[in-house]
Image (cartoon, grey):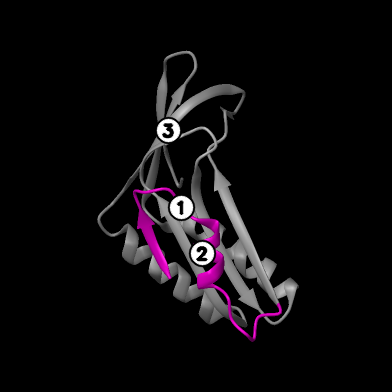
Amino acid sequence: MTGLRSEPLSVDEIRAAAADPAAGAVVVFTGAVRDHDHGRGVTALSYSAHPSAAAELYRVAEKIAASHPIVSLAVAHRTGDLKIGDLAVVAAVGAAHRDVAFAACQALIDELKATVPIWKHQFFADGTAEWVEGA
């Protein structure tokens, strides 16, 4: 299961999608909107995605699945307006052993941030805003 969502993400849903009887370990990562960035107060943000982003996210998931001995993977990323504390991304990776699950989950998030065309528009407490690529 992979995808982009405009509605709030569910950790339970992503975790359940990665459940597998062969998985002795399921690592779950959640990325939440924080109230600061590089020493500046953040009040909110909005994620925008290129029309190819869903397909690219799927490609990233397939790449991670092919390059790590995992048994399951699920990932979803939010789009639209988010508040402080909202979940922006949830990923779960299942593997026979925890070291593989941790490594694959980190690789998944790193690759997602590096290649999936999702942009973050951050709004700061001082009234300014900025766009950030590689959300």
- Compared with 79, 96 (above or below) is below
| Residue sitting at x 55%, y 37% | 85
For the residue carrying disc 2, how many other residues have a C-alpha within 10 Å: few (<14), some (14-19), or many (20+)? many
Instruction: Identify the residue under disc 2.
Output: 14
**In the image, residue 74 lies at what x, y percent?**
50, 68
Q: Earlier in the sequence, mark 1 or mark 3?
A: 1
Q: Residue furthest top?
A: 126
Residue contact at pointers 3 and 2, CB within 8 angstroms: no
Q: Classify the position of the N terminus by image quarter.
A: bottom left
Q: Earlier in the sequence, mark 2 or mark 1?
A: 1
The front one of 52 and 46 is 46
| Residue sitting at x 40%, y 71% | 59
**Measured Cα–Cα span from mark 3 to mark 2:** 23 Å
Residue contact at pointers 2 and 1, CB within 8 angstroms: yes
Residue 37 relative to residue 82: left or right = right
**Measured Cα–Cα span from mark 2 to mark 1:** 8 Å
Q: Name the secondary structure under disc 3.
A: strand
Is 22 included in the stretch rendered in magenta? yes
Is 39 included in the stretch rendered in magenta? no
Q: Which range is magenta?
A: 1-24
In the rendered structure, find residue 45 and report the number of the disc placed on it.
Answer: 3
Instruction: Identify the residue under disc 1.
Output: 9
Q: How many marks?
A: 3
Mark 1 belongs to which amino acid?
Leu
**Measured Cα–Cα span from mark 1 to mark 3:** 16 Å
- Compared with 36, 103 (above or below) is below
**In the image, residue 55 lies at what x, y percent?**
32, 66
| Residue sitting at x 38%, y 62% | 3
